[in-house]
Image (cartoon, rainbow, N blue to C red):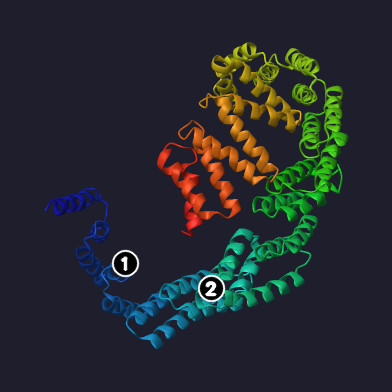
Amino acid sequence: MIKNIFLYSVVSFFILNIGYSQTTTERKLSLAQSYEQVGQLDNAIRIYEEVYSQDKGYLQAFHGLIRSYKLKNMNAKLLELLEDRIQFDKKAVNYILLGEARWNAGKSSEADEAWENAQKAEPNNQFMYADLAEVQSRLQLYKKAINTYKTARKNITTNKGLTLFTEELSKLYIAVGDTKGAITESLTLLMEAGALPAVEARIYALMQDDDNLGIIDETLNNFIDRNSSNYMANELFSWYQTNLGNHDKALEYTIKADDISNQEGRLIITFGGNAEQAGNTDIALEAYQYIIDQGKSNKFFTSAIYSYTRTLESKMMFDKNLSKDNILQIIKRYKTITEEFPKSTTAADAYLEIARLQKDRLNDYKKSEETLFELTKEIPGAPQSGTAMIELSEIYMSRGDIVEAKSFLETAKARYGRNNRDLIEIIGYRQALIEYYTGNLDSAEALFLVLSEIKDNDIANDVLEKSSIISDKYKEEDKVKVFASAEYDMIRLDTASAITKYETIINELRNFDTEIWQRSHLILSDIYMARNNVQKADYYLEEFIKNLPDGVHTDKALFKLASNKVIAGDTSKAIELYSKILINFPNSIYLDQARTKIRELRGES
């Protein structure tokens, strides 16, 4: 009831706002349109029919009847209206509508006749063909729509130099399963409109059906042969080869596209970045290498070098056994930066990366030291020189030269620390470590206490760990000094001395609930595991668990021991140990990993 009141109110509003200047017929048409807008189709039809019967020249009434009849599914009335109209109004649009009504009435041959008459009426009107094909497509008469578009191409010779209806035909060919036709139209669209993403999307969709692959391959190979000097064609073919996994060929055509379009390496470095993100590191390296070989004159030269080294380093993360030649290749690329862009911050970054690779991957501390000194000499004003001094301090620490190590830290603090908070924090941490390693526990504790107030830096966890170890000095000060000395032995690569000291702590310390007792077991286990002495590695973990079944780090010991059992092939024991973590340590950080391992060992999905 409320709805009806509202509708009548709306209609009344329209009636009241019809100007007195309107004729009676115009007011009727306005009223009919108002009824139509609010869904009162029966009232709208009644008025439209009344006006149209009085004067068929009122097109508003004619089109209003067409709309209303369609909405009410009154196809018989619509057909009657159009059959009558076509007798005196032989426009193409009327033939198109008549054909649609006849088709819906099951009169297919008569519908075809009407559509043919539409084309005869306005053979040079491309919009007529578009309207007709749209109606046929809506009726799912895809082949008829295709033929309509083809006829348009025959009758209309120009479309501002572009081929008519390429986009529409490509979609219709897909609908009827004509793969070759769909690709051909898409390729025409590419060449004329440059719609590369849209064309790639359509070809990719077709590639999902294995039955299409042969046709696609043949068509695209013929296409690139005919258009080898067109950069869009080469870009498309590169994309296609990438999807097939033919990365070398894809790079080849990217280089051609880049050369033809004078992109100066833009397409190539983009290709390399996409390959890198997809995990295809080898072909990414080749792409970057191509630009690097062109020298500094290429505007993407620096980006290519950085991308090359970054990609190789990323590869190193997954390949710990990366060859020495690979490492030297990365260093060579960084050295190119220092030579081509001397005194720059870019070069300063490169010096640091070279030094780290020399120390961490080649174990060449002498070369690393020389590189760091070169950085501080060549670019003394760069912030990276402060970092170089910190890393020089670490190298001297590893040699046992405490005095020189301290000196580097003080110099870095004085020269570079004034406006560099992060650098000051790192220097403070390194100074605290020196006091710790040399047994000055009170000084170390005070320095770590200052650093512990900083919650958002990268060394926060390391500070917390060292502070927990130093807190043992209130129980076992002498043994804490032994533990710190053992850690320093590890830095100096004197593993034998470190083992002796860790074993001394284990054998002489009866306070199992100390950090140093627990960590000594875990570190010794790691040392022997690295030496492939699984029996000795397991021994220290088993002793830990036996003497301290519910300690702070017992869950870690259980996880390590379980992992060792997996390596040894003792699946049942591994599951038992992982299960103990689930039962006894519900808040353990290893909880999720333990669950996953149990499922994997049981063969569960």
Element type where label 1 sits in the image? helix
Q: Which mark is residue 67?
A: 1
Can residue 109 be seen here?
Answer: yes
430, 79: nearer the viewer: 430
The reply, left or right, for residue 320 in relation to residue 105 is right
**Is residue 300 shown above or below 80?**
above
Residue 193, image x and y in percent? Answer: 64, 61
303, 495: nearer the viewer: 495
Amino acid type, callout 1 = Arg
Residue 250, image x and y in percent? Answer: 73, 61
Taking the spot 80% from the left edge, 56% from the top edge, the residue there is 259
409, 131: nearer the viewer: 409
Residue 50, image x and y in percent? Answer: 22, 68
Amino acid type, callout 2 = Ile
The reply, left or right, for residue 377 in relation to residue 460 is right
Residue 354 falls in image quadrant: top right
